[in-house]
Image (cartoon, coloured by chain):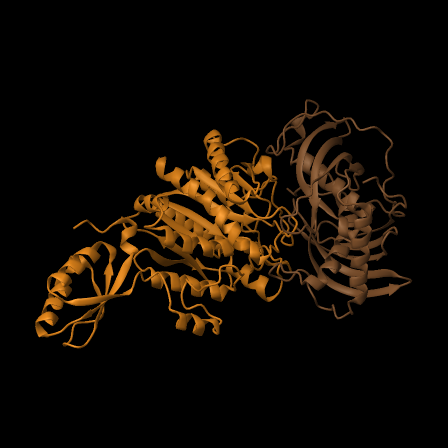
Chain colours: A orange, B brown
Amino acid sequence: MRSSGGCAVHRHQVLRISVADEAQVQKVKELEDLEHLQLDFWRGPAQPGSPIDVRVPFPSIQAVKIFLEAHGIEYTIMIEDVQSLLDEEQEQMLAFQARASSTDNFNYATYHSLEEIYDFIDLLVAENPKLVSKLQIGSSYEGRPLYVLKFSTGGKNRPAIWIDTGIHSREWVTQASGVWFAKKIVQDCGQDPAITAVLDSLDIFLEIVTNPDGFAYTHSTNRLWRKTRSRTSGSLCVGADPNRNWDAGFGLAGASSSPCSETYHGKSANSEVEVKSIVDFVKDHGNIKAFISIHSYSQLLLYPYGYKKAAVADQKELDEVAKSAVAALTSLYGTKFQYGSIYTTIYQASGSSIDWAYNQGIKYSFSFELRDTGRNGFLLPASQIIPTAEETWLALQTILEYTLNHPY
Amino acid sequence: MQPRRPPPPAPGPPRPAAPLLALPLLLLAVQGAAAPAGPEAAEWRPDTGPPHGLLRQAARAALHFLNFRAGSPSALRVLAAVQEGRARINAKKECTVDLVFTTERYNSEEGEESLGKCSARVFFRNRKPRPAVNVTCARLMEKTKRQQEDYRLYKQMKQLRNPLDGVSIPDSHGHIDPSLRPVWELAFLGSSYVMWEKTTRFLHYYMAQLSGVKQWETNDGAIDFDYTVLLHEFSTQEIIPCRIHLVWSPGKPLTVKYHCQELLAPEDASGTEEGSAVAPTELSNF
């Protein structure tokens, strides 16, 4: 009996067992008592004629089938894999519903509201309870929960990778890609050797809507809103730039001290609760090994610093990683990316997330700017969501694997 | 400390579009295509700060100017790649950039492969806007085809009735209804003038969204188009609404008037920029 561990934990089959007589009922009850099999009876053993439905984790499947067959107990496999899907009838029914009932009929090729994304998160967790959990790391300025998805195959406080999307609310392709990444991780776990290897040793934390107040505002009022929605006393202007609010070169050149500016750094470092929540989480965790913030647009892969020109100590290594990540990305659709430090590649920017993360000792800190280069800008057509997410994933995977293979 | 900002524009009558310079272009191949931003040539002194993709900056300025001057909404170009270039900076921090770049059609169809090559000299006067541009491009479209496309666009626009109030183009999902594409392209043409005028060594613009169409008439065979556009300035990340009024008919020079709202910090006087221009009557050789 091999130990249940790694991605195998989240793959299951659901069996429907038909018991012919009381003796067979008893046999199935014996099976129920074997705790190490971790069987989950949806419809427990009762009497002959009543079907018994049981969800069987992957590592136990072999053993259970052998047991049933040895005792002449009939069974059918109800759902080949609970991740896979719905029959025709249900699909048709769902076509009339606005709301996805599973992450397999969720529409990844369109932009979604905050509510839809939060529903998606709950669905994903419900479908993959052993692999995925939802953490609330805080609440936004206007009281919306800040949710982080944790992907873990076990262990205790394993080294981990942090990914955030949507810190700037108008960059809609990033939240949409975050949703796609979440599903991708679940699909690849146990299927793709690279991600399976990553999840065998590391955890992944993914915050899809890092700025929910701003995101709600882009839906309700101003599609091009960037900042948080915090109120500044003494000013009519609202919001601070959450990517100028981190405690790394805070307030230096590369951010604005005017509350009306799009790059207003905020009252003080970590004044924005959306930022503080991540800072507290990362510090409390203490074992984050890579920190990746995702933005749009410009098609860039950036590493620290933004607040000063000086190269980071690990510049050479980060540059190599960026180079291979970009090569992986470009290999899919030919999308061209530039890479380099924030300061030399894009502009001087102080108080940015990855500068802070790097100074905390998180060596593999990167920031992405996804499609495009200005033709559509923030209003990237929805038809480009999936290609963008697919190519970006290849770059992310490169970074994840590198982090796995270069512990520090 | 405030980020870099341009000084307010000088008052006075608006300048017409910069005249074509008669200087021959000096182009020396210096480095390969698509390198990450870095110092470009021996003359470039890095003491003024990061290069900020100087070649791409120059290419964008050249393209805005080219698009406006060509006056053809069906032949709009965007930057494909910078191929080579060099830059010189003088004691007054004025910067001359010579470069070669490739372009593609702004409204290119799926799989369409047209890469027109351009060479340009762009002169940035320190932080001042309205860079002087001399640009020459290989033909992207046959002249007759371009004229036909323009005329087709013109006819489509004439047929559009005016229920365009409250319409944002594109919508929040980045979608532009095919029937409204001509509107977008004409708006982009007018915006090109505005974006060229506002571009400096450090500031560059994209057209983010057409947020309002006020008026739309066709008098004397021309299209009289009054609209509001949201420009996205990259280094400050600001969104700048501009009211633009243009008059266009195929084959004729474009006239543009505009008024942009500058949403600056309280310490800067809230300013508005105005400008207008008529494109020169001769067309560039492309």
Return the x and y of residue B95 as percentages of the image width and height. Answer: 75, 31
Return the x and y of residue B4 as percentages of the image width and height. Answer: 68, 41
Using residue A222 as the reference point, say whether residue A93 is left or right of it.
Answer: left
- For the C terminus of chain A, which image quadrant? top left
Using residue B246 as the reference point, say whether residue A53 is left or right of it.
Answer: left
Using residue A348 as the reference point, say whether residue A210 is left or right of it.
Answer: left
Q: Quadrant of residue A336?
A: top right
Foreground of the two, B148 or B118:
B148
Give the tally of numbered discs: 0
In the picture as drawn, the residue positioned furthest to the top comes out as B42
Foreground of the two, B163 or A319:
B163
Answer yes or no: is residue A281 visible. yes
Return the x and y of residue B106 as percentages of the image width and height. Answer: 70, 49
Give the residue drawn at x 12%, y 65%: A72
Q: Is residue B123 above or below residue A21?
A: above
Give the residue drawn at x 81%, y 59%: B154
Return the x and y of residue A148 as percentages of the image width and height. Answer: 41, 56
Answer yes or no: is residue A245 visible. no
Using residue B22 as the reference point, say whether residue B272 is left or right of it.
Answer: left
